[in-house]
Amino acid sequence: MASDTEMRRLAFIKHMFQTGVEESRQPRPMCVKAILSFHDSVELFLDLAGDTLGVNTKNTPFLGYWDKLNPALETGELTQRERMRRLNDHRNSLKHGGRFPSAEEIDADRAYVSAFFVDNTPTVFGVGFEEVSLIMMVSREDIRKRLETARESIDGGRFGEALDDIAIACFELVFGYSRRFREAFIDSGFYFGQSFRSEAFYTSPVHGRELQTFVRKVAEALDAIRPAMRVLALGLDYKRYAKFRVLTPIVYRAAKGGTYRVLRRPGSPSPTAEICEFCVAFTIEAAIHLQEFEAGLDLLDAGEAGEA
């Protein structure tokens, strides 16, 4: 059974592979980067296998790992060597020859690398590749538990339930961040004013219909800007956040009581396993990014009314 250290390294390897999967689905020529991510993820796996099995793999050529590692395995052997030879050829042609692989070659390599991990992770580490997750690297217990619940829902095919938990986890992580800092420090730098989204605000009497319309439009514009400003201020990838936001439901948290409410976004795509995997990955990346900043700070856990 893999140790905690090995699981953390495997989690990073899986993250790199998933990055390659996302890159492979981008338009050309951006999708070509996937070949490098796929190759790096496999090579990191082989290096970790050498460390786990006590085999010195220093300066080992890519295809030489199979010859070195297989004798050290008690049961089974590493598979997918010929398919990884193909991946290695594509990587070398790209990196050293400037040849871009075709879309069909990238699709095939994605499938082959996935099969490599599914076949070889249990052989070397005694765990299934599907059991490896970066969730264990999230330090905040409340976020980690929600993501673990979401993972159980994904495994059970309950993708809508999974997206609810993922959306709440990200809301609590990102949009509760400024209040947690504000309660610890007077000026956090991450506070952009209160939300205007309240029934009382929109229904309160205002002198003149034109003025009321103007105030409503200003409020709506500010409510649209505030989340974007906060995401950018926290140093998160806004394009990935924008994609996350389209795919996940709207989350509201009551100002009193801290209860959550989720609403489906009009026109959002039907939940799928692929959508859930992207949203989990984004939330984990955000959590790891933010917890580095929080290191050594004793921040209070508090929610914030509004929309994620």
Image (cartoon, helix red, strand yellow):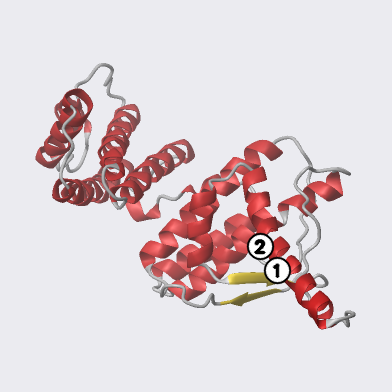
Foreground residue among 193 and 22: 193
Left or right side of 71 for 55 = right
Q: Which secondary structure lies at badge 2?
A: helix
Q: Residue at x 62, y 46 (%)?
A: 232
Q: In the image, residue 247 lies at what x, y percent?
A: 48, 66
Q: In the image, residue 11 lies at what x, y percent?
A: 42, 44
Left or right side of 269 for 299 = right
Cα distance, mark 1 to mark 2?
6 Å
Q: In the image, residue 139 lies at what x, y percent?
A: 62, 46
Foreground residue among 251 and 101: 101
- The quadrant where residue 86 appears: top left
Residue 128 visible, this orientation? no
Q: Amino acid at mark 2?
A: Ala
Q: Residue furthest top?
A: 59
Foreground residue among 267 and 92: 267
Task: Give the vertical position of 49 relative to 104 (above or below).
Answer: above
Q: Which quadrant holds the N terminus?
A: top left
Q: Which residue is labeled 1 in the image?
A: 220
Q: Which residue is labeled 2 in the image?
A: 224
Q: Residue furthest left?
A: 82
Q: Residue at x 68, y 71 (%)?
A: 252
Check whether the beta carbons of the residues at disc 1 and disc 2 lie within 8 A of each other: yes
- The quadrant where residue 120 appears: top left
Residue 264 visible, this orientation? yes
Tell me the crowding category of disc 2: few under 14, some 14 to 19, or many 20 or more residues within 10 angstroms, Cα based.
Answer: few
Left or right side of 129 for 260 = right
Task: Give the vertical position of 289 relative to 266 (above or below).
Answer: above
Q: Which secondary structure lies at badge 1?
A: helix
Q: Residue at x 86, y 81 (%)?
A: 208
Q: Amino acid at mark 1?
A: Glu
Q: In the image, residue 54 lies at what x, y percent?
A: 31, 25
Task: Give the vertical position of 125 relative to 242 (above or below).
Answer: above
